[in-house]
Image (cartoon, rainbow, N blue to C red):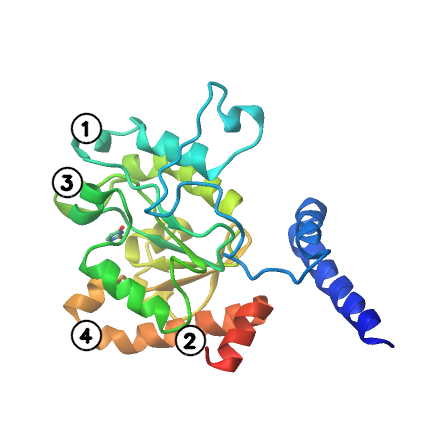
Amino acid sequence: MTAEQKKRLALFLDLSGDYLRDGYKQAREEYRFIDDEEMPPRGTEVQETGTLPMETGHAGGSARPAERGIDSLEAVEEEIRGCTRCPLHKTRTLAVPGEGVKRPLALVIGEGPGAEEDASGRPFVGKAGQLLDRMLSSVNLSRERNCFIINVVKCRPPNNRDPLPEEIVPCGSFLSRQLRILKPLVLLSAGRVSTQTLLNTSEGIGRLRGRFAEYSGLPLLPTYHPSALLRDASLKRPVWEDLKLLRGKLTELDKHYALEIAEGT
Ligand code: URA
């Protein structure tokens, strides 16, 4: 077999995998990318929404994409920013839709914005957020390159109290839409509130963490919230064990990530 034939066969096998995982439409879109060149790693596709801090573009026009049957991150973000579905909108400064890359490897799901997030409109930017960034970076992940970060509620609960069911429930459809659009490979739920919400359980985070569960057909790994680590440094070890599980799962699921890990880059 010539080198060219081998390359075509590898491409075919790769696309067949994508087809089985993502369905025909998605595989066809990826084919457009790789027909002339190599498939780009997840997270490197052109950003078409204002999901990173430096980007400000919002969906314009009168008919919302969701109403035309085409949903987009821009549309979801715009709705989140103007949302009045629950009383949290009355006390928020800014809603926090989330940020990161399109088609992330991992979707990180936190609880809800705190004071810094409420002031900036960005998720996980306070002390806990800085620790989250370091946790992700220890396994070659970041919001700039291959992750997306959201919360189960998009507006700050007063005094950082736990969000109430009547605040979580109306926010649920935003999360579902973000999930459908972003198509992450894995979910990392940070802390008790997001984990219990997604898994619909009252089991404690200490019992839920350390193994993959499933949410919406995707592997979901619960771990401690970074703010818990700031209060109790002994939780860093179990979180590191969780991060290694996450790294292992992503190594199985994404060849570009696996290569990066193997090369130690
Ligand atoms: N804690 C969270 O759960 N989310 C944030 O965005 C910030 C702190």
Question: Could you say where residue 14 lies in the image, as x and y percent from the top left?
Answer: 71, 64
Query: Which comes sooner in the sequence, label 2 or label 1?
Result: 1
Query: Does any atom of ligand 1 lie closer than 8 Å to the CB of label 4?
Result: no
Determine if residue 261 is in view. Answer: yes
The residue lying toward the viewer, choosing from 104 and 172, is 104
Q: Which mark is residue 158?
A: 3
Q: Please name the residue that numbered disc 1 is placed on.
A: 90
Determine contact: label 3, label 1, CB under 8 Å. Answer: no
Determine contact: label 2, label 1, CB under 8 Å. Answer: no
Residue type marked 4: Ala
Q: Against 229, is 178 above or below? A: above
Q: Residue at x 33, y 52 (%)?
A: 194
Query: Which comes sooner in the sequence, label 1 or label 4?
Result: 1
Query: Disc 3 versus disc 2: distance between alpha carbons?
Result: 34 Å
Quadrant in which the N terminus appears: bottom right
Question: Could you say where residue 176 lies in the image, as x and y percent from the top left?
Answer: 46, 41
